[in-house]
Image (cartoon, grey):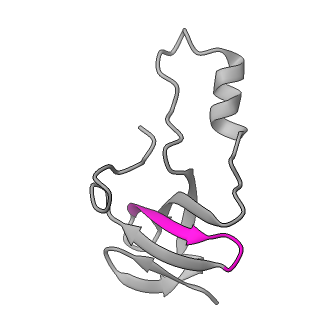
Amino acid sequence: MQLFPCPFCGPRSESEFHFGGDAGNHRPEGFRAVTDGEWSNYLHARNNPRGAANEIWMHMTCGEVFRMERDTVHHRVARSFAPGEGDGHDGMAH
């Protein structure tokens, strides 16, 4: 079992969390102007980096969404941030 650090509740079992996608993957604007290709890229194209990753997660127990920086090779979490904490932006898709 891996522990993930919820910025609101502290370290918790990874089974309590839901992956929300890459941080900064912004939803396309303009309902009628978005092409099928743009929508498909938003939904399915992933960076899938080897190493450092910047991701959005939800802690299902408290219902809070946050950003987590982790290493995908070694499964180490560097840090997690509540929206607006850290580097000055929340990095979340709107």
Q: Nearer the viewer, residue 36 or 53?
A: 53
Residue depicted at x 37% and y 84% = 10
Q: Image check: 20 left or right of 47?
A: left
- Please provide percent x and percent y for residue 42: 62, 34
* In the depicted structure, whether residue 89 falls above or below residue 65: above
Residue depicted at x 70% and y 18% = 36
* In the depicted structure, whether residue 12 falls above or below residue 53: below
- Please provide percent x and percent y for residue 79: 43, 74
* In the depicted structure, whether residue 77 falls above or below residue 35: below
Could you say which quadrant of the image residue 40 lies in? top right
Q: Nearer the viewer, residue 38 or 69?
A: 69
Magenta span includes 12: no
Magenta span includes 71: yes
- Please provide percent x and percent y for residue 50: 72, 63
Overall secondary structure of the magenta section: strand
* In the depicted structure, whether residue 62 falls above or below residue 86: below
Residue depicted at x 34% and y 74% = 7
Which image quarter holds the C terminus?
Answer: top left
Q: Nearer the viewer, residue 80 or 13?
A: 80
Residue depicted at x 56% and y 70% = 70
Q: So how many labels did they put on this image?
A: 0
In the rendered structure, which segment of residues is drawn in magenta?
A: 64-74
Which image quarter holds the N terminus?
Answer: bottom right
Name, please, the residue furthest toward the top: 32
